[in-house]
Amino acid sequence: TTKATKGNQTDSRTTPSPSEIIEERGEVVIEGTIYRGSLTDNLTGSGEIIWPDLTSYRGEIKKGLPNGEGEIHYPSGKTYRGRLEHGKIQGLGEIQWSDGRSYRGEFKDGIISGKGDFIDANGERFIGDFLNEKPHGSGTLFSSYSSIYMGEMQNGLMQGRGTLAFSGGGLYEGSFMENQMHGFGEHTSSDGETYKGNFKNGQRHGFGLLTFKNGRVYEGKFSNNQPHGEG
């Protein structure tokens, strides 16, 4: 029994802990994942993690997982800076993609959700509510061709009530469906002509009141953007 106990004690002394391995070699490899830094035996502290797919993390670590403030670099060139919880992007942070896109704002379980600011590679920008990676709720959309939309969004599309200021100077206030004027609204063109009435798929359609820039008024039905029938 004494001999066996002595043997066990010898084994425990010859098997270094993760923190001892890091101190001696600068890193420890566990199931293909590399850990470096100032870490305890249960891999808690601050340091660096490199996973087998070469995704790397530098920051606060708890029990072998990113936890707290840190920075992730992905093989694709994407980078994340911000908060993480139990290995997942959570709370406030910022993502930069290699193609020029960027997002700064809230995350939930690794997904863009909450209040944020997204800039596309083509210059389009949305500031407002996000859900499951898409603008959803309300916010302001600055298009790449200089129009500005303020209002409701659903699944990345202008949908609901909103105001659209066109790059050419016109203005529309009313209902939208799938990025188009649809339902009741009021449109003022850049030359001063105003239309108040129904729209369908971006065009005047149904009953409406059109006031020409010379003051003449047409009230009646519209079809495919044009007065239709007796006014």
Image (cartoon, rainbow, N blue to C red):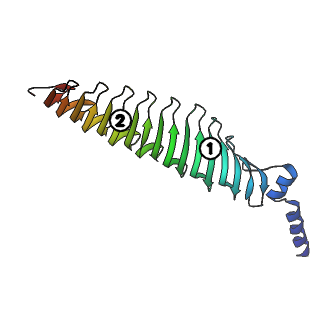
Instruction: Name the residue rendered at 59%, 41% in the picture.
Output: 95
Which quadrant of the view contains residue 53? top right
Q: Is residue 96 left or right of residue 136?
A: right
Upstream in the sequence, badge 2 or badge 1? 1
Instruction: Please identify the quadrant where the C terminus is shown.
Output: top left
**Of the pair 3 and 205, the residue shown nearer to us:** 205
Viewer can see residue 8: yes
Which residue is denoted by mark 1 in the rendering?
80
Instruction: Name the residue rendered at 34%, 39% in the picture.
Output: 163
Which quadrant of the view contains residue 94? top right
Position in image of residue 143 (x %, y %): 44, 32
- Amino acid identity at mark 1: Tyr
Q: Residue 164 carries which label?
A: 2
**Of the pair 13 and 218, the residue shown nearer to us:** 218
**Of the pair 197 and 30, the residue shown nearer to us:** 197
**Of the pair 120 and 140, the residue shown nearer to us:** 140
* Element under disc 2: strand
Instruction: Name the residue rendered at 27%, 33% in the picture.
Output: 187
Viewer can see residue 131: no
Q: How many labels does the image show?
A: 2
Q: In this view, does 156 lie to the left or right of 47?
A: left
Q: Residue 63 carries which label?
A: none
Instruction: Name the residue rendered at 55%, 34% in the picture.
Output: 101
Which quadrant of the view contains residue 39? bottom right
